Image: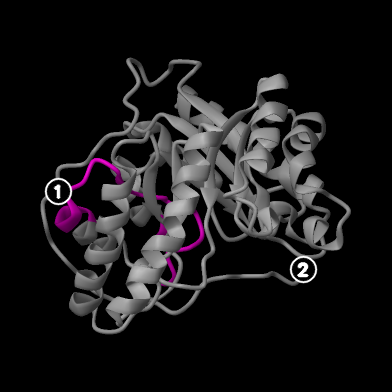
């Protein structure tokens, strides 16, 4: 199976620092049946959306019907620039409320980077992302998922990210919306760099999105374990399956045991990126792996 992969090479930056994590959702008991919810990321259906076979406003009801999933994440591209259109966003919210669907977060793929080396570019990035904070708040989402992937010298890059992301967090502080950094290229794939960023930001509205498959050459299991305390959600990325239905890049049983043994509580979202497999089938296989992995973790 040919795989689409958004990963870039890691620039290692080991930072040994003690952090005070935010612990977004601590369950009373690890075995609480309401502790985890399965969600899905709209990017899973990027080919259907681009071809016009699936419409953005129909996506939430589509995944409820096809996958029995009621927690949805959005992708910025299918909004087609209408995220500031109050009627457009209100209609999406109306449809989800009517179906009992919970809006979780928005994956924001803006061209302008929050950690750009030029302050004028960071200023523009902050302004562009503010509209997504407003959109997420209107929809009832708990976060927007952003990139810091300019790279360069890790310490210089850290300072730039603190500036851009910090200003966006300040804008979001009077809303329920967190600014969650995705491990998505260069320094941001290094969990120690992300943890250093959390320490420097020291902001209640800053977070990290642990991704099962986006930490580059760094040990993915250790990376997820380190970043879970700062996670309002978890990305269960899947690329390819073997004949027994196991994901070929990530040991889901091992990964979900780490998630289960942590203090994380919330949405574990499917993000299927495999080519050559229907995204509905890929999503169902991923959902089954999550359910089996959590069951095994509870019984171990």
Quadrant including the C terminus = top left
Residue highlighted by disc 1: 19
Where in the figure is residue 290, as x and y percent of width and height? Answer: 59, 37
Q: Relative to 102, does residue 21 appear above or below in the rendering?
A: below
Q: Relative to 153, does residue 226 appear above or below in the rendering?
A: above
Which-is-in-front pick, marks 2 and 1? 1
Residue 53 visible in the displayed image: yes
| Badge 1: residue crowd in 10 Å (few <14, some 14–19, many ≥20) | few
Quadrant including the N terminus = bottom right
Residue highlighted by disc 2: 1
Task: Give me the residue at 47% from left, 30% from top.
Answer: 297
Q: Relative to 221, does residue 125 appear above or below in the rendering?
A: below
Q: Which residues lie in the magenta part?
A: 198-220
Element on which disc 1 rests: loop
**Reading the chain from its start, which is encountered first: label 2 or label 1?**
2
Task: Give me the residue at 42% from left, 50% from top.
Answer: 209
Task: Give me the residue at 74% from left, 28% from top.
Answer: 68
Q: Main secondary structure of the magenta part?
A: loop
Asked which quadrant contains residue 147, the reply is bottom left
Task: Give me the residue at 45% from left, 30% from top.
Answer: 266
């Amino acid at each position: 199976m040919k795989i689409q992969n958004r990963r870039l090479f890691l620039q290692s930056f080991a930072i040994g620092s003690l952090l005070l994590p935010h612990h977004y959702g601590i369950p009373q008991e690890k075995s609480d049946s309401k502790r985890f919810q399965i969600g899905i990321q709209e990017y899973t259906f990027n080919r259907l959306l681009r071809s016009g076979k699936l419409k953005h406003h129909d996506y939430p009801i589509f995944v409820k019907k096809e996958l029995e999933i009621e927690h949805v994440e959005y992708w910025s591209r299918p909004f087609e620039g209408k995220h500031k259109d109050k009627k457009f966003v209100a209609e999406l919210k109306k449809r989800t409320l009517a179906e009992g669907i919970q809006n979780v977060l928005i994956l924001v793929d803006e061209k302008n980077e929050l950690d750009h080396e030029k302050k004028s570019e960071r200023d523009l990035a902050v302004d562009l992302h503010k509209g997504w904070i407003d959109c997420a708040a209107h929809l009832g989402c708990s976060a927007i998922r952003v990139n810091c992937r300019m790279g360069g010298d890790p310490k210089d890059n850290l300072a730039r990210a603190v500036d851009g992301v910090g200003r966006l967090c300040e804008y979001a502080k009077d809303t329920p919306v967190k600014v969650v950094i995705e491990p998505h290229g260069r320094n941001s794939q290094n969990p120690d760099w992300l943890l250093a960023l959390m320490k420097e930001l020291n902001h209640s509205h800053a977070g990290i999105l642990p991704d099962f498959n986006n930490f580059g050459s760094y040990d993915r299991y250790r990376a997820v374990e380190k970043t879970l305390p700062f996670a309002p959600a978890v990305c269960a990325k899947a690329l390819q399956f073997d004949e027994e239905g196991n994901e070929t890049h990530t040991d889901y049983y091992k990964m979900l045991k780490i998630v289960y043994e942590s203090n994380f509580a919330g949405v574990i979202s499917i993000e299927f990126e495999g080519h050559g497999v229907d995204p509905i089938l890929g999503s169902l296989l991923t959902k089954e792996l999550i359910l089996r992995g959590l069951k095994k973790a509870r019984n171990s």
